[in-house]
Image (cartoon, rainbow, N blue to C red):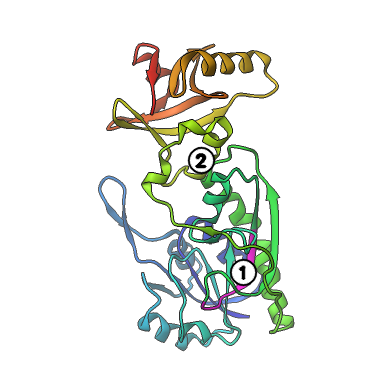
Amino acid sequence: MRIVFAGTPEFAVPSLAALRDAGHEIAGVITREDAPLGRKRVLTPSPVAVAAEALSIPVLRANRLDETATAWVRELHADLGVIVAYGGLVREPLLSLPKLGWINLHFSELPRWRGAAPVQRALEAGEQRLGVTVFRLVPALDAGDVLARDAREFAEGTPAGDALTELASFGTAALTSAVAALDRDPGAGEAQAGEATYARKLSRDDGRLRLGGGSRSVLAQWAGMTPEPGAYALHEHAPLKVLELRAVPEDSGEARTGASAAGAAEGVGAVSLQDGRAMLALHDGALELVRVQPAGKAAMDGVAWLRGRGGSAVLA
């Protein structure tokens, strides 16, 4: 099948590679424009642009799927459009240009978590079963007929970045299956069923840890906000990034005792040394601050940061 592909970040690359490996002709790739990265703000091509150019696939860099993108796709005469985390909407007349329309690999079990940040919002809500859905693009948000889906369980506290990386590879089977289904039957697909929920776009404020929510809730929020927009708490009115946060192992009686002591004796938000670890006290126990980054400083182990504060601190 002759395909036009739209995608931008690293976790869209496995889908591009899988389609190519399945024998499909990738007529062209649309990705967002080169963006400034790093301290020196060097203009850097997207991971999808790098992958496409390595495969000698024509690339259009565009931050909007506008008239220019539409004209470019029209010249490709594609059978199908595939979009994976491009970062923009496909509207008419571009939506109807490929013979079979467009399909999207979405990182949730639709209709749950429609929108911009499905994995992050699912993890924030404490969900450990994360899925992928391949569906037909229609004008309504993530509402088209489903062609393929799959799901798997993740360990509690898995950061969103790690989950997305795994789902990016895991989801390629569903994507190639969906394309094969359309090749056999252009009318394939089933309507979505169930209650829809919305995964709104992330903001920096979403990353501020709600320390009053209890250990599982705080760990879930941290997981959903890591690495972007980044989880943090306030220490002496300045943000302290929480780069790695760890639950107390349930099979460790000593660790559970230390966590309970920290939570009961220190008060919510207090950080103290417990058995050589920096333990963040919560109302139902504690979590371990494994790695942190104070404002304006380099990342460091939680214990090193805490010892620099005299062995105790309070987060808000």
Using the image, determine if residue 127 lies above or below residue 192: above
Judged left or right of residue 153, residue 46 is: left
Q: Is mark 1 on a helix, strand or loop?
A: helix
Side (left or right) of 70 relative to 121: left
Mark 1 nearby-residue class (10 Å; few <14, some 14–19, many ≥20):
many
Residue 133, x across and y down, in percent? 64, 64
Residue, far right? 184
Mark in the foreground, 2 or 1 = 2
Which residue is depicted at the point 65% across and 73% down? 23
Quarter of the image where the C terminus is located = top left
Residue type for callout 2: Gln
Residue 211 as seen in the image, left or right of residue 168: left
Which residue was labeled with disc 2?
Answer: 221
Label 1, on which residue? 19
Q: Which mark is residue 250?
A: none
Q: What stretch is highlighted in magenta?
A: 132-139
Q: Position of residue 299 (x, y in %)?
A: 38, 30
Quadrant in the rendering for residue 108: bottom right
Q: Which residue is drawn at 53% across and 75% down?
A: 140
Let me know if residue 243 appears in the view. yes
Residue 128, how many percent across, how many down? 65, 45
Earlier residue among tags 2 and 1: 1
Q: Does the magenta stretch include residue 50?
A: no
Residue 199 vs 40, above or below: the answer is below
Does the image show residue 162? no
Question: On screen, 199 above or below 27?
Answer: above
Rendered residue at 38%/21% (across/down): 314
